[in-house]
Image (cartoon, grey):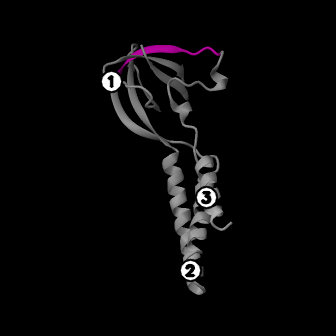
Amino acid sequence: MKRLLPVIAMGMLTLAGCANTAPYGGDVYRGSQAQTGQSVAYGTITALRQVQIQADSPQGNVIGTVGGGVIGGLLGSQVGGGSGRQLATAAGAIGGAVAGSRTEDAVNRTRAWEMEVRRDNGESVVVVQRADRDFQVGQRVRLIGSGASMSVAPY
């Protein structure tokens, strides 16, 4: 059973720590956007920069931190004996918690484009979305939506 616990904990951490980053792409609409009117503007990409989007974790890295701590503690408890085992367990739990938190951060990150687009009316807007397609400076695009809900699509 002791050998099975790390496997179970790692499996739960792997499954639960994965955020859905698909909504950050230009080809994905939220359910609330379906069957609603969207404004459309046209423009040209004037600047393009690769960035990363850090997905919001509703648990705030709790899953990675706790899961990593449990796994680290279990692994640490396999080392030494007596007070040495207690120290190894504590060190393993702390190290595992830190590693689990950082792992969850990395898993919840996705490549994205920061696109500056000069609209045909002369105004500029910056939109960040998942890098699910190739864009280039000088490319004509459509800006779909407005405010906090805008995406860029090829024209």
Horizontal and vertical percent position of residue 16: 63, 48
Q: CA distance from mark 1 to mark 2?
A: 55 Å
The amino acid type found where label 1 is placed reads Gln
Task: Answer left or right for 127 relative to 79.
Answer: left
Neighbour tally class for label 2: few under 14, some 14-19, many 20 plus, Cα within 10 Å: some
The residue that disc 2 covers is 87
N-terminal of the two: label 3 or label 2? Answer: 3
The residue that disc 1 covers is 136
Q: Residue at x 54, y 15 (%)?
A: 39
State yes or no: discs 3 and 1 in contact (Cβ < 8 Å). no
Neighbour tally class for label 1: few under 14, some 14-19, many 20 plus, Cα within 10 Å: few
Q: Residue furthest bottom?
A: 82
Q: Residue furthest left?
A: 138
Q: Residue furthest right?
A: 1
Q: Nearer the viewer, mark 1 or mark 2?
A: 2
Q: Secondary structure at mark 2?
A: helix
Q: Nearer the viewer, mark 3 or mark 2?
A: 3
Q: Secondary structure at mark 1?
A: loop
Asked which quadrant contains residue 51, the reply is top left
Query: Which contiguous range is marked in magenta?
Result: 36-46
Tell me the quadrant of the picture where the N terminus can be found: bottom right
Asked which quadrant contains residue 5, the reply is bottom right
Residue 127 sits inside the magenta stretch: no
Neighbour tally class for label 3: few under 14, some 14-19, many 20 plus, Cα within 10 Å: few
Tell me the quadrant of the picture where the C terminus can be found: top left
The residue that disc 3 covers is 7
Horizontal and vertical percent position of residue 132: 45, 29
The amino acid type found where label 2 is placed reads Leu
Q: Residue at x 51, y 61 (%)?
A: 99
